[in-house]
Image: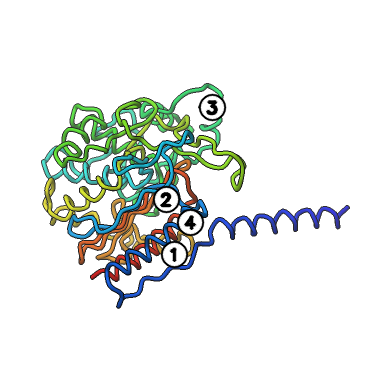
Amino acid sequence: MLLIAGAVVALVVGLFIFFEYRVLSLPDFSAVEQATPNTKHQALSQWLDALAHQRKFNGSIVIAQNGNILFQRNIGNTNIHGQPISDTTAFNLASVSKHITAFAVLMLEHQGRLSRQDLVSQHIAELSHYQHVSLDHLLKNISGIPDYARSRTLAALLKKQRTVFTPQHLISWLAAPAQKLKFTPGQQDDYSNSNYVLLAEVISRVTGQSFSDYLQSDIFAPLGMNSTAVVNKCVNTDKLKDRAYGFSKQFFYFGLAVEQDLNHFDGVAGDGNIYASAHDLVIWDQALRDGTLLPKEIYQQAYQPTRLDNGLWVEEKVAGQVIVPGLGWNVQDFPRVSSYGVWQAFNNFYWRDLQHNTVVVVLSNSGYFLRTAMIGERLVKFAETLD
């Protein structure tokens, strides 16, 4: 029996490795620096053709410099019904949303409407027992506040009650005696989606508008980001006419396409659920560079590495790489910064070279995070040959 059990385990492990290899293996591609721009673009187009043929990418890709689109490609469909992706298709940015939430906080601070040193309890009285947690702690993910998205108990309860999780649910959950800080604020780091949902709630209470309305009126509309909005199960469900819906294979590696879109946790925003097209993220990149809504010297704070109270830099490991977080950005390669996002079937890669004014956007509504990141990294190498 032990031999049979061992053989079964070995077979399962072997199949897993085989399928993972198939999922993550990509066609060969290298950008030759000496080649002409046309030759480079042809090589990239052929590589993306191969990805499309092998069904290894579904989404939008844009490479831009100084606000000008140098390369763009849309591959696949917005949903399981076969509607093609277009230049205006908006994708759930998942955690790429966080740096936009952080931007709103910095803008409100610049306007004198709040301070990063404000305690959370000053704005959300229901959380009065979190006496030493500041907005800055939330921004830097060093608050010690537990992550709602990791709570299996909470997920099971929401599913059982068929309830959509809202900011008020989060506040009530955190206010319960059972929920305590995981550590003294500022002394450790722990990535928590709760931090950015609370920041969105603070923004709402400070401005007197919903988080969605504030971003729309003060950020997206002034910049002409017409394919960008906060969307979840409670807000703007039908606002975006060209919206991507997440989908995946029925049995993970194979099978029919099935919807893997918003779920019972998606009545909140700030940590995610900002939708945008790849083109709008080019507009956003240029606005950050130009200081259109917030002076560039103020926004430089977003690129500062996070320090703990003991002076040590925060470092995280993701897929074997060392990541140094800023405010919604990975800043270990500054002046190159990046942001990743994963939620349901959405997988996103956003890379900006602040020195050469280059941006790479990869948005997928039916992908695997590592593969999407690998595609993004190869596109970065291509973009670096364009100077």
Chain-order first, disc 3 or disc 2 = 3
Three-letter code for the amino acid on which mark 3 is drawn? Lys
Three-letter code for the amino acid on which mark 2 is drawn? Asp
Three-letter code for the amino acid on which mark 4 is drawn? Leu
Circle 2: is it few (<14), some (14-19), or many (20+) Cα within 10 Å? some
Q: Which residue is mark 1?
A: 321
Tell me the CA gap for discs 3 and 2: 26 Å
User: For the residue labelled by badge 4, is the local secondary structure a helix, a strand or a loop?
Assistant: helix
Chain-order first, disc 1 or disc 4 = 1
Residue 35 quadrant: bottom left
Q: Residue at x 20, y 48 (%)?
A: 283
Q: Residue at x 28, y 52 (%)?
A: 327
In front: label 1 or label 4 = 4
Q: Which residue is mark 2?
A: 190
Q: Which residue is mark 3?
A: 159
Q: Residue at x 48, y 33 (%)?
A: 178
Q: Tell me: 364 left or right of 109.
A: right
Residue 151, x across and y down, in percent: 51, 38
Tell me the CA gap for discs 2 and 4: 21 Å
Residue 203, x across and y down, in percent: 23, 35
Three-letter code for the amino acid on which mark 1 is drawn? Gln
Residue 113, x across and y down, in percent: 14, 37
Q: Quadrant of the C terminus?
A: bottom left
User: For the residue labelled by badge 3, is the local secondary structure a helix, a strand or a loop?
Assistant: helix
Numbered disc total = 4
| Outermost residue toward the bottom in this view | 34
Q: Which residue is mark 4?
A: 370
Circle 4: is it few (<14), some (14-19), or many (20+) Cα within 10 Å? some
User: For the residue labelled by badge 2, is the local secondary structure a helix, a strand or a loop?
Assistant: loop
Circle 1: is it few (<14), some (14-19), or many (20+) Cα within 10 Å? few
